[in-house]
Amino acid sequence: MPRIYVALDIEATGMDPERDEIIEVAAIKFREEEVLERFETLVQPRRPVPLAVASLTGLTMRDLRRAPSFQQIAPRLRQFVRNYPIVGQSPDYDLQMLSAHGLELRNPVYDTFRLATILLPDLPAYSLAGIAARLGISVAQQHRAMADVETTMAVFLGLCDLLRAYDPETLRRLADYSAQAGLPEAEVFEAIYHELVTQGIGQLGDALAERVRSSVPGANHAAELVFLLPSDRPPRLEPTGEAPVFDLDWIGRLYGPEGPFARSLPGYEFRAGQVRMAQAVTNVLNQGGQLLVEAGTGTGKSLAYLLPAVLHAVARGETVVVSTDTLALQDQLFAKDLPLLRRTLEAAAEHDPRLADAARFRATVLKGRSNYLCLRRWFLRQREPFTSRAEALLAAKITAWLAQTETGDRAELHLSNEEQLAWAQVAESEGACLPSRCLFHRRNQCFLYRARATAEGAHIVIVNHALLLSDLLAESRVLPSYRHLIIDEAHHLVDEATQQFGFQIAHEDMRELVRRVLGLDHLGRYTGVLGELWSVLAQRPDGSARAVARELGQRLTDLWPRVETLHQHTEMLFHLLAEVAQCHPVENGGYDRQIRITGALRQETIWGTVEELGQTVTSHLRTVLSALQWVSHRLEDLPAAIRDELSELVTELDVLERRARELHGRLQEILFSPRVERVYWLTWRAQPLSVSLNMAPLDVAPLLQEMLFSRVDTLVLTSATLTVDRSFDYIRQQLGLADADELVVESPFDYASSTLLCLAEDMAEPGEPGYQRQVNEALLALLRVTRGRALVLFTSHSALQAAYRAIKRPLEQEGILVLGQRLDGSPRQLVERLKARPATVVLGTNAVWEGVDVPGEALCVLVIAKLPFAVPSDPVFAARCESYSDPFQEYAVPQAVLRFKQGFGRLIRSTRDYGVCVVLDRRVVTRRYGQLFVQSLPPCTVKRVPVAQIPRLAQDWLVRQQDRLAARVPAEGGSGDGSAGS
């Protein structure tokens, strides 16, 4: 008989079981789709319902005043639930709340959130409503207990139906990996596995799979079969041999009031700046060369470069690479702008035959190596025991996902931080693959090289800066050949080059190397690649293989103590490095502690001990490297047939040899042979605990010039923030682009009429006594009169938290919700809540200074608490400052100005937007460099006033803007903002 379950949900005054109280409980007892019994009650709390909870649930103290206490309803709830398995959406919270209120339930618990992350890997969000929508389940109401319980029941049944579509072997592996991860849901996988086997489903498939497996060399189990069958390679792009020169006037007409965009886009607005940019991009594609373009917000810069890029790429049969910094822009280009461009070109081809071929352009997104699953490493990893819960849970997610994915892209999975770390063990990585030896690569099944092959046939290839730059250093390139490059979000290029042209040695890197080379299991058997090679060779009947096994066994006997010593001294080295970090406290405004390794530090006594341990580690690392090299050479003496059968292990051996050599060289450089053109530092992080050694180049400009800029015919770099006081001098110097053409395209928005910039002239300066208190008081006064609708930008989490503690309760008592980054959710979650409920204030740090897009009245107030200067103790910033005669004016100020412009850009996102930007750092008024910050912004209405006057000024401005907008609507007939491109 089918099992009985209880779906359960509670609503409470908050998320803290020790402080908060339950206000509603609901449960449904069900067997399959049959509802057997319901339980529902409100619960009277002893404290008021917070505004945030009332706004979500609709429950107020008036609703709860006559409800029973939890103690009164607890016995009935216990009797209802009995010993049935509990089903819930993230039910750990519900059970903790019940336990804190005296009701301890020890039933089996199945989590629909956890099941969905395994079975629906590519959902953008895993809210109950999001999962239900994906399963086709309608949701009438949210955040009320009974409505959520009904949805939870339907979601659970829907997820069980998804499981029934898997083959029994996959279900068996899901159950196994989930059990190893300690997931109660393993029982669900196991039950449906037995259900299918009992029905005889899968038995014929298993028999056929066994027959195919025996005919495919290299397949260890049926899951590998599908990836070992040959796959067709997509066609490459063929150059046409033409070099067309497109007429600039014709390009301009395409964007004009009578052009194809105007005909295709409802409410399209002609923008002269977009035409100027498109013509400049076309000109540099026509002639070759370099172009810097600052395109103000609202220009439509993406379509200003995409159309010329498509026209040239199709006409020439060549690839144009478009690089972005953020995933958001990458998604916008591929999922929104390019489809819009294709539709526009298809419609326009009827009027202009020259556009017919262009409408058939091909485009793709290509990501960095580590985003793709390496099938060789994945199947090899399954032969070893998992060492953590995260590894086992990741294995369960990958097992379910492999039956669905076409790309092998990690972005399709929902992974925790710990699972992200485990992903590195099975991901593609430079040096971890030898394509010529990989069975999956030879059959065109490798996810990375299938993506590369698709890119070789695409006219437009969208990448991120990380891949663009890391590919320059790779022995085996991922990107197809290209001669035309457009870099959007170019203000991030220097930072990304700093990271990609440097390196990091994490504690975990060393641990993983040792684990993968040689270990011992609980039975005293050798593990790792050397252990597995010895085991496989020793079991073969061939005399040559057994001879190598004997020699290898002797080597392992001698090597194992060295490997143990390497492991022990590596642990000692990185624990000592953590002590070094803790002995040198720095204020960096974040959660990491970064200590620059200077000449002075190298003279300290503790660093002498670091070097002694480093000598031991590098010495034993050389021993391990020698052993790997010996085994590689010895295997070459074996017959080809045996080597073919050992191909996966031989590849792993080669990969580890290269990795050991790389780690040895990097350790040697940081500890003993530092180079003057590089900066070194160590990073210590408390949560999760980690230590790493790091290197970065001091100057990336010559590296970019040599490896990238000099190798392309066409280079366009664009962003909304490239100039400081309308000059490209700073970015030219940073990138080494002295001879590039330049263009500034002003925003089409009327900032003078729509935007008030208030500069507080009587605040204490940051760092002075009373500054944080004044910030808190200014925020309270301002946000009360604006009723929220605000984004407040900080430069450190400590300042954000201080403001959050000071303003949250007073504002929420007045109906204004206060949300803090990391405290109440991710930046994306907070922005969505701001859009949904305008009487909200979002406090954010680095991730919110750019990329946030909230058009309309939900965001009318932007507060910049402090000018965004870099943290002086940042190792790279401090080292680079030493190369300037006036580091503050020449380096720190321009860098901060560009960051300031990015933050300011969050306020006005469309022609109908209006708002107030408040700067609570008086240095923008009192210091000579402050005028650079103001002059670098669009021409707003500027007021330099005492902070006490700002709330009234802001209120008056917003009221006048509302009146102005209301007067415009009838005259405009309600027309929208029909911009083309970002």
Image: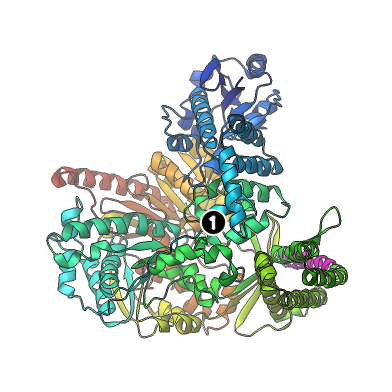
Front-most of residues 85 and 54: 85
Q: Quadrant of residue 315?
A: bottom left
Can you give x and y, in whole percent of width and height, for residue 603 in the image? 77, 80
Helix, strand or loop for the magenta stretch, by majority: helix
Q: Is residue 585 within the magenta segment?
A: yes
Whole-percent x, y for residue 900 in the image: 43, 64
How dense is the environment of label 1, judged by Cα within 10 Å: few (below 14), some, or many (20 and up)?
Answer: some
The residue labelled by disc 1 is 227
Position above or below: 22 against 341: above
Q: In which quarter of the view is residue 834 placed? A: top left
Where does the image place residue 335, in percent across and percent down from the top left?
Answer: 36, 54
Side of 55 where 300 appears, left or right: left
Residue at the image position 30 percent from the left and 51 percent from the top:
914
Q: How is the image coloured?
A: rainbow
Q: Nearer the viewer, residue 694 or 14?
A: 694
**Image: magenta residue range:** 563-587
Residue type indicated by callout 1: Phe
Between 903 and 301, which is closer to the camera in this rendering? Answer: 301
Asked if residue 187 lies left or right of residue 778, the reply is: right
Quarter of the image containing the C terminus? bottom left
Q: Quadrant of residue 12?
A: top right
Task: Find residue 685 and report its horizontal and vertical position in percent.
Answer: 68, 59
Q: Residue at 62%, 17% (x, y): give it.
A: 69
Locate the N terminus and report the quarter of the image it occupies: top right
Residue 924 visible to the viewer:
no
**Quick check: can you spot residue 959?**
yes
Above-or-below relation of 230 to 20: below
Q: Secondary structure at mark 1?
A: helix
Image position of 519 with respect to 115: above or below = below
| Residue 78 belongs to the span the image colors magenta | no
The total number of labels drawn is 1
Above or below residue 699? Residue 582 is above
